[in-house]
Amino acid sequence: MKAALRVYYSLSHLIRELMKFGVVGGVAFLVDVGLFNVLLHSTDKPLTSKTISTVVATTVAYAGNRLWTFRRRERSGLRREYTLFFLLNGVGLVIALGCLAISHYLLGFTSPISDNIAANVIGLALGTAFRFWSYRRFVFRELRPAPSLPAPAGALSEVRHPQH
């Protein structure tokens, strides 16, 4: 039991980030689907509706991840972060489309349920895993510790720190 608790505590930061990432993704998904349907019914332009809903949902996801999920990570500028975030979302979409293409065209699973499983279960899961990893790695990077300065000549070699 102690070993399991040690593993949990060592991974607790990652688990919290992953849970927050899921909540933000769920909200962005609801924004995407909801706005798409509102726009589709009011304009009858599916491609325009999907483009607008995707951009808005991506912006909601970026804001949620920057302000909540990865708020304790390094900030490297809105333009850089949002651009990378948007591009990495595109890679996640390509992953989902690749799963759908393989299932539908290569394996011959052409029913609507097969397409949904390939795109919205397998593709979404793989794309989401990629996005979580890539956002942590490239967009919202770990804070780097400040470089330590060399001790002046004759300074004490050991500094005592108060107990926490």
Image (cartoon, rainbow, N blue to C red):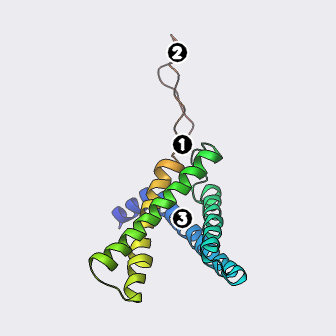
Residue drawn at the location 42% of the way across and 76% of the way down? 119
Residue drawn at the location 35% of the way across and 68% of the way down? 1
Q: Is there any visible trace of residue 161 in the rendered image? A: yes
Using the numbered discs, state the Cα–Cα distance from disc 3 to disc 1 in whole angstroms.
Answer: 18 Å
| Amino acid at pointer 3 | Phe
Mark 3 closeness class: few <14, some 14–19, many ≥20 residues within 10 Å:
many
Q: Disc 2 designates what residue?
A: 155
Of labels 3 and 1, earlier in sequence is: 3
SS for callout 2 = loop
Residue drawn at the location 38% of the way across and 60% of the way down? 7
Using the numbered discs, state the Cα–Cα distance from disc 2 to disc 3 in whole angstroms.
Answer: 46 Å
Q: Disc 3 designates what residue?
A: 21
Using the numbered discs, state the Cα–Cα distance from disc 2 to disc 1 in whole angstroms.
Answer: 29 Å
Task: Please tell me the numbered disc located at residue 26.
Answer: none
How many numbered badges does the structure rendering display?
3
Mark 2 closeness class: few <14, some 14–19, many ≥20 residues within 10 Å:
few
Q: Position of residue 19 (x, y in %)?
A: 52, 67
Q: Is residue 6 above or below residue 108?
A: above
Q: Disc 1 designates what residue?
A: 143
| Amino acid at pointer 2 | Ala
Q: Nearer the viewer, residue 158 or 12?
A: 12
Q: Quadrant of residue 29?
A: bottom right
Residue drawn at the location 47% of the way across and 63% of the way down? 15
Q: Position of residue 122 (x, y in %)?
A: 38, 75
SS for callout 1 = loop
